[in-house]
Image (spheres, grey):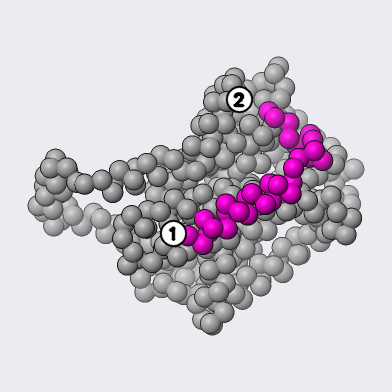
Amino acid sequence: MRRIEEIDALRGFALFGIVMTHMFEGYLASMTPPQYIGFNMMYSIDGFSQMIIKYLFVGKFYAIFSMLFGLSFYLILDQKKDSSSWKFAWRLILLFLIGFIHHIHYRGDFLTVYAVFGMALILFRRVPDKYILVLGLFLAFNGPMIIAKGLELLPTSDMQEMQEASAASLPTAKKGIATNPMDQANAYFDLVLNGEYVKLIQSNATIGFVNKFNYLKFSGRIWVIPGLFLLGLWIGRKKWHEKLDQLPLVPLIKWSAFLGIPCVLISYYLSIPEYSPLLKYLGFVAGHAANIFIPLLYIGLLLLLCTMEFSKSSIRKFILVGKMGLTIYVMQSAFGLFIFYGYGLNLLLKLSGTVALGLGVLFFLFQMLLSKWWFNTFKFGPLEWIWRCATNLKWQPLIK
């Protein structure tokens, strides 16, 4: 249906941004060891590409994807008051299993993360809308981490100074623990470059999960993702997806641009290490605000294009990609690993970031053609079909 197609178009658009981000990063999901920093900066244009990806892609497209996940929760479960929470939980368990297989190959997987946080979303099924909105905004803007970093700017108390002095007096052997993350990054980078498939699987299945959890904490996404889920749930409850033709898209675009673009510029100009802690903190806050306002800008622009005759045919290509979003996402990872990792073409240190982006665009265009061909015959994407069959515990018709 038309409304669902617009949701699928947004999902497909988000997948484009996700593959572009990951391609520029070489499909790595770890700290970059000092000796490899700038591994994809080979031409002068790569600096410009890096700036575009960092400020207009990173954190922006996964935000759209996350809000759509919350909206999907509403459509599947919350909208139907007599639907089973247990069935939805089983659906998430299956998603975690799919994500686990994906994660042991690519530790940047977010399917496992969505499955875990989706379980928590079930607890909010009966929570009133106003609490959903307030908590969703607080978490989506990374409120807990903003408050924590703000407290770090306060004058250090005597007790804190004593604790720091005590920590400084610890034996060198114990303090050496702090070097472990970089040691792990070096070991992981070596596994990627050497193409040691079995060892990579073992590493991702063990320390990879620990690194993922640490990244979620360090980046604040441990708060942001549930917040975006809640905002998607709130949007569903307000039934905005059912009245897209009534939404004030032009004001949404104007206000999100008015707030989001300055936030991007502030986060860019205040990212210089030489700035004072206060200025860097302001840049940090602006960056997280941009991760909300810029996605809203993208959403408004895409929905506006959905209403225009000249762009409808182009938008339909995103719709078909979005309809098989799970399959498309996993395919993108398989492509990236084949391009960059040692057990594939081993091009990690041989491709510039801009060239990698070009490959990402070409592969996404291929996925558009593939999805069009696929849906000429089939009802669901392959992984979507498997997921649906396992959820319902019976075979579902696949061919139209």
In the rendered image, residue 105, in percent from the top left (x then y), is placed at 54, 55
From the image, tell me which residue sits under label 2.
129
What amino acid is labelled 1 in the image? Ser
Q: Which of marks 2 and 1 is in front?
A: 2
Residue 85, quarter of picture: top right
Q: Distance between the residues labelled 2 and 1?
A: 37 Å
In the rendered image, residue 93, in percent from the top left (x then y), is placed at 58, 34
From the image, tell me which residue sits under label 1.
30
Q: What stretch is highlighted in magenta?
A: 237-266
Residue 240, quarter of picture: top right
Residue farthest along the top direction in this orientation: 82
In the rendered image, residue 253, in percent from the top left (x then y), is placed at 69, 51
Does the magenta portion include 50? no
Identified at 46% across, 70% down, the residue is: 194
Residue 400, quarter of picture: top right
- In the displayed structure, 56 sits above or below 102; it is below
In the rendered image, residue 92, in percent from the top left (x then y), is placed at 60, 34
